[in-house]
Image (cartoon, helix red, strand yellow):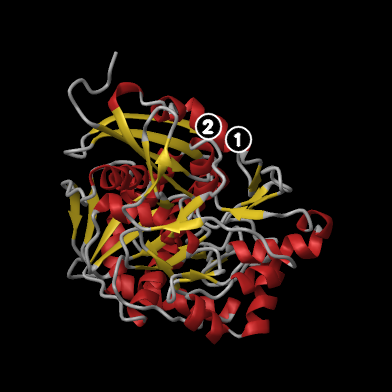
Amino acid sequence: MSLALNRRVVVGVDSSTQSCKVVSVDADTGELLQLRSAPHPDGTSIDPQRWWEAFEAAGGAEAASGADNVLALGVSAQQHGMVALDAAGTPVHDALLWNDVRSAPQAAALTEQYGASMWAEEVGVVPVASFTITKLAWLRDSRPELAAQVEQVLLPHDWLTWNILGRPDEPTTDRSDASGTGYFSVHSNDYRLDLLEAALGRAARVPRVLGPSARAGRTLGGVIVSAGAGDNAAAALGLGADEGDVVVSIGTSGTVFASTAARITDASGSVAGFADAAGGQLPLIATINGARTLVATARMLDVDIERFGALALAAPIDADGLLMLPYLDGERTPNLPGATGSLIGMRRANMLPENLAQASVLGLVCSLADALDSLRSQGVPVRQVILIGGGSQSPAVQKIVADVFGVPVMLPAPGEYVALGAARQAAWALDGGFPHWKREIATELEPSATRDWAVDVRARYAEQRGTIYGV
């Protein structure tokens, strides 16, 4: 049965760390018509073929054929992943993902070699282990025989788009995803191939960068394929974020970003000066430890996530002085790839399951509040927060987040906003004009008049972060 009799349908793909989601959307209204998904294997490196298998299982290949009135399709995906291909288009190594920190020594070496100021002022980002350029340097240092075979380098969204279009001679990307490589200058809107060659040890081809509303091509079924985007840029599109709106996403990772016209040059590396998917900038702070902090604490307490949330809600709001610094998998911001988490302020009286659960929630939200402060330090206005991601649905998170952030927090109606942003871009490529779809806010949270407790917790968090980690 057709999904959309007498409707024009666009499709958005979100190929994330954990899964591939495919949404079908009414091109004129933004109404969600169908959502399908398929999982990706866990880990920090992956054979890209697993992405294609999940894309097919989630109905992506069917959509690309033009079934069910599909007219256009857009792909968004996790950023930074290294897809290094040989002359035959075969990966020379599993794709290293954004959360693979084995290239931390290479990130430090690249920063030292060129200087943090050069990276911030000329490229827009300062290398950390997440970025593609550091992974290429790792390949050069650790597997030189494989690095010598690399002919071209793609990102996850580039690779999927290329395969959807039947592997044309010239792969494509967009500015938002290219800006996360470390070898594309956001300020000059051009590649820095000298930096790529220095990192990899040889020249390699890179995809052509398309404009926000451009078409990458058509599938064999006649479906228009848009430029695509990195996941966070696609989320900003899907949410219709305006100046002053800061998006906080609590998913596998934590991300804090805003779509703005401001030029970002942060030599500290805290704020990455990425590009958005609409022609502007997307200053972004990412943390490795997102909602999995809560999941790990629930596992430690031997409870499911629902019981974990009930425990946190039953605790004193400040966890009776118990404090968690949640760097459980190392951390990207602050740049502590080798760090482990810390639990501080333990007393016999406060060592209760309820307090541990609440300390985990507080640690997660405080780390995101630090990220908001970093955006403010770059002159990015923070009028309100739009809170998304699986972790945003936690009642324990919702109870404290406006007080800890100190600004109003909007929770949109639950939705797949990365995939929706890819669909919105597909509609843009289809019609040539930006589609103005309505944003639905489900809940509005305001800071309370008695938020002194949150100020105190954040002060203790900052003190212990400095004492233990020196940042």
Which mark is drawn over residue 50?
1
How far apart in space, not on screen, are marks 2 and 1 (Cα)? 6 Å
Q: Is 445 placed left or right of 222 in the picture? A: left
Q: Is 75 placed left or right of 238 in the picture? A: right
Q: Looking at the image, how many numbered discs can be counted on the residues?
A: 2
**Residue 141 drawn above or below residue 240:** below
Pick the front one: 222 or 424: 222
- Residue 40 shows in this picture: no
Disc 1 residue type?
A: Arg
Q: Is 440 placed left or right of 399 in the picture? A: left
Q: Which residue is mark 2?
A: 54
**SS for callout 2:** helix
Answer whether labels 2 and 1 touch (C-beta < 8 Å). Answer: yes
Pick the front one: 354 or 390: 390
Which mark is drawn over residue 247?
none
**Which corner quadrant of the image does residue 330 belong to?**
bottom right
**Residue 204 drawn above or below residue 298:** below
Q: Where in the figure is residue 254, as x and y percent of width and height?
A: 44, 58
Q: Where in the figure is residue 262, as x and y percent of width and height?
A: 31, 77
Disc 2 residue type?
A: Ala
Q: Where in the figure is residue 388, as x and y percent of width and height?
A: 33, 51
Q: Quarter of the image containing the N terminus?
A: top left
- Residue at the location (53% across, 55% down)? 207
- Residue at the location (54% across, 38% down)? 163
